[in-house]
Image (cartoon, helix red, strand yellow):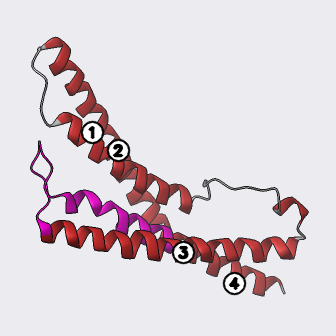
Amino acid sequence: MRDKLDKILETSLSLLLGLMVINVLWQVASRYVLNDPSAFTDELSRYLLIWVGLLGAAYASGKGMHVAIELLERKLTAKQKQYQQMAIRLVICVFSIFTLIIGGTRLVVISFQLGQTSSAMQLSLGYVYMALPLSGLLICYYALSDFFNQLKSSHGAS
């Protein structure tokens, strides 16, 4: 399941990034070549950047490419490092649940209820904000998957 999810995220991120590049190129071309700037391109590039950033953070989290401070880790024994990694994964999951999933879902619901739309594209901002709970779910899935894999391997080694 994890490999399929990684592949879906890789493909989605590639498509979103490609769309963002095309959008920005069109923005530059319409402004400087055609002398008629496109109204929606600036807004679209911002929203695509939000989605790429949040989904990219989830993908990086799943690949273990997130930022880490290893000062304490260098002083720990192998067993202590395992416990530290497990605790970090649980903290990441709790943060994702409360901040991204619960907070993000509330933001999405409120945006739809209030009928907030973007100025140029008239797109409901709820769709933009859906990147928050989605990335939270993915980050939490990856953290719990790594937690249980590490738990299984540490009990198998005992």
Lower sequence index among marks 4 and 3: 3
User: Circle 3 — which element?
Assistant: helix
* Picture layout, residue 13 above or below residue 22: below
The total of numbered circles placed on residues is: 4
Which residue shows up at 69% across the image and 56% down it?
A: 68
- Tell me if label 4 and label 3 are in contact, CB under 8 Å: no
Residue position for label 2:
49
Residue position for label 4:
152
- Tell me if label 1 and label 2 are in contact, CB under 8 Å: yes
- CA gap between label 4 and label 2 equals 37 Å
- Between 79 and 133, the residue placed more toward the observer is 133
Lower sequence index among marks 3 and 1: 1
- Tell me if label 3 and label 2 are in contact, CB under 8 Å: no
Residue position for label 3:
93
Q: Position of residue 146 (x, y in %)?
A: 61, 73
Residue position for label 1:
45
Q: Position of residue 132 (x, y in %)?
A: 36, 63
Q: Viewed as shown, does residue 114 lie left or right of 6?
A: left
User: Circle 4 — which element?
Assistant: helix
- CA gap between label 4 and label 3 equals 18 Å
Which residue shows up at 88% across the image and 68% down it?
A: 76
Q: Examine the residues drawn in magenta and state their main secondary structure.
A: helix
Q: Position of residue 77 (x, y in %)?
A: 90, 70
Number of residues whose C-alpha sits closer than 10 Å to that of mark 1, classed few (under 14), some (14–19) or many (20 or more): many
